[in-house]
Every structure is written in C-alpha cells, then in structure tokens.
Image (cartoon, rainbow, N blue to C red):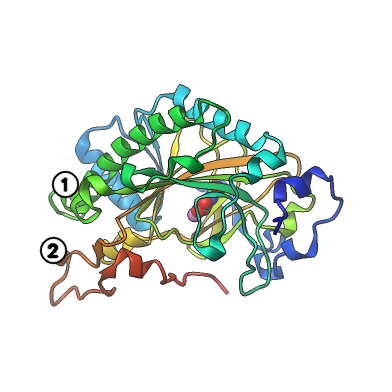
Amino acid sequence: MQVERVQALALGRLNELPEKFIRPAHEQPLNTRAVEGIAVPVISLAKPHNVIVEEVSEAAAQWGFFLITDHGIPASLIEELQKVGKEFYMLPQEEKEAYANDPASGRFDGYGTRMTKNHDDKVEWIDYFFHHTAPPSKVNYDIWPKNPPSYGQVNEEYKKEMLKVTDKLLEVLSEGLGLDRKVLKSHMGDGEVELEMKINMYPPCPQPELALGVEPHTDMSALTLLVSNDVPGLQLWKDDNWVAVNYLPNAVFVNIGDQMEVLSNGKYKSVLHRSLVNKERLRMSWAVFIAPPHEAVIGPLTELVDEQNPAKYSTKTYGEYRHRKFNKIPQ
Ligand code: OGA
Ligand code: NI
C-alpha cells in the first residue's frame, strides 16, 4: 500500500491542515504556554574534567537535557551529515519509496511516516529515515541510502564521532553518580552499544499552530545526541511549562533517555519533549539514539540502592523495557 508522505503532501501547497494532523486543543502550540528565553544548560567539554562532571550531572538531574560545545566533532562533518541527509530527501519520491519501512511487520529500518494513529487519533507532521549505525553486527547496510553516493562514508565517520562522545558522556555521568567511570558503559554492552540514526524531516506546514512534529514523548534510549538545521522547534517539559530550545550552531543536543533514568535510579531524568513545525521553513534534525543491546539487563545500579534508597524501577532486559512507556504526558 502506498503511504502518504508528509513531504509529498506539503509540496501540494495546502491552505489548510488536513484534519488528521490537527492536535487536540490542549496539545496545540497555540494553546500551550511556552517559555522562551530561559536558559537551557550549555556545557563546554573543554572545561576541566571535574567541572564537566558537576555540570553534566546537574543538568541531567534538573533538566534531563543539555547542549554540548567543544565536543570535538568537526563542524565540517556535521555540515556534510546534514547535506547528504537533505540530498536524500530531495530525491524523486519513487526513489525514496524503494527504502520504505514497514513497522507493522517489524521492519523499522528505512524510510517512514507514522501511519498508526495514537490514542488521540492524530498523526505527526513528519517523515523520517531510520537505520542502525553500530555495532556492525546490527547494521543493515542495504537499507542505507545509496544516493547521494557519499551518504555511507559520511555516516560512518559521524558514527565514530558519536561513539567517542558517548564514551565521554557515559564516563562523566558515571562519575556524577559517585561511581567508577566505567560502570555505565559496562551496563550498556561495552563495545556492543547500539547507535540508531533517525533523520527527521519536518516540511513547511500550512497551520503550524495546530500541529506537532513529534508529540510529547521520552526517548527509550539511554542517551540521545541530536543536531538540527538552523530552524528551531524542539521543546522540553520543565516545571510544568514547555521550554523552547534555541538553535546554537555546532552544538549537540543531549537528551537523557528512559534507560539512563532507570540505571541512575531516578537521579537523571528522562526528559519529556516534543517538536513544533514551521510555516515557511523546512526543519530537519538528526537524532542518534544510544541504547544497550536488547539482551542487556537494565535496572537501578546496585551501587545506588540500599535501605535508605530503595529501587524505584524494576529490573528487566532492554528488550522487555522497550514495551514499557514512561508516562510523563501532561493532561
Ligand atoms: C525524536 C525527537 C526532536 C527534534 O526524534 O525522538 O525528539 O528536535 N526529535 O527533532
Ligand atoms: Ni525524542
């Protein structure tokens, strides 16, 4: 069955948003109070190590979110990553359809658009491309875009940088829990940590004040590292308000995900977030989800649990956790 892509729909220059995209009133950007200008933590990885540990663990606990700068990823590589991603979406529709995924039959890798409606009967204003980038044994290179031809090489390079940043963040987050720097990595499968790339494409939307790009959710990963083009759209749920995250050139957005909240026994918060869309401008973002292998056992770290600090979460394999949703959705 041919899936209706949001990008193709947007090309039709609609004057009105089709009904299936119109969010219930309490979710519409128009009707929610969004706080602009309160500062989301920005952390330079060039600071002394003990300062980074303090700032990262504080941000992970208070916000579940921060931006990193001086992370060592070449600006030219981030530019290339964005260029090849954009070029893929500019291909003729038939060429993109050759990569279509099929979540209903368990094939998540590939080109996708959310078809299944959520409980509110609404869908999101977004197309995406999803594929694994690590470890090599989990990567289906056949589904990676073959066009533009440099897509594969650029994404391999970017994966290496993501693995380096992941190592650094896992060390710092371990130390922030008062533990040896290797502890979190050892619970994430060591060298078998999984990286998944999701390229989000939010075409211009005729009535952005009624729609959402992605609806409120927490990421089920342990961490998510995201870069976007220069169009802002991400919002975080903080102290009962939506807080807009501004674009900062070359910074990488870091989300704490569900698995990190569980491992830290609730010290680090998996942040509830959503994204808005734009009337004139195309927004794109590149999210890398960092997750343990399916069979990894995830529960509050035993070092953090005692009589005074009982476990707040059950212990399950990551594969089992996948089916559990953190319920942080504001009503
Ligand atoms: C996601 C996500 C936000 C964004 O893909 O999980 O939250 O800014 N994306 O695109
Ligand atoms: Ni997310």
Residue 110: % across, % down: 54, 48
Q: Is residue 183 above or below residue 151?
A: below
Q: Is residue 295 above or below residue 290?
A: below
Query: Along the line of sight, which residue is nearer the eye, 249 or 20?
Result: 20
Residue 306: % across, % down: 13, 73
Task: Say which quarter of the image contains residue 124.
Answer: bottom right
Q: Is the N terminus in the top left, top right, bottom left or bottom right quadrant?
A: bottom right
Q: Residue at x 21, y 45 (%)?
A: 171
Callout 1: CB less than 8 Å from ligand 2? no
Residue contact at pointers 1 and 2, CB within 8 angstroms: no
Residue 86: % across, % down: 61, 33
Labelled disc at residue 181 = 1
Q: Residue at x 64, y 41 (%)?
A: 96
Q: Is residue 115 above or below residue 98?
A: below
Instruction: Of the two numbered discs 1 and 2 on the same chain, state the one appearing first in sequence.
Output: 1
Residue linked to disc 2:
303
Q: CA distance from mark 1 to mark 2?
A: 13 Å
Query: Along the line of sight, which residue is nearer the eye, 309 or 205?
Result: 205
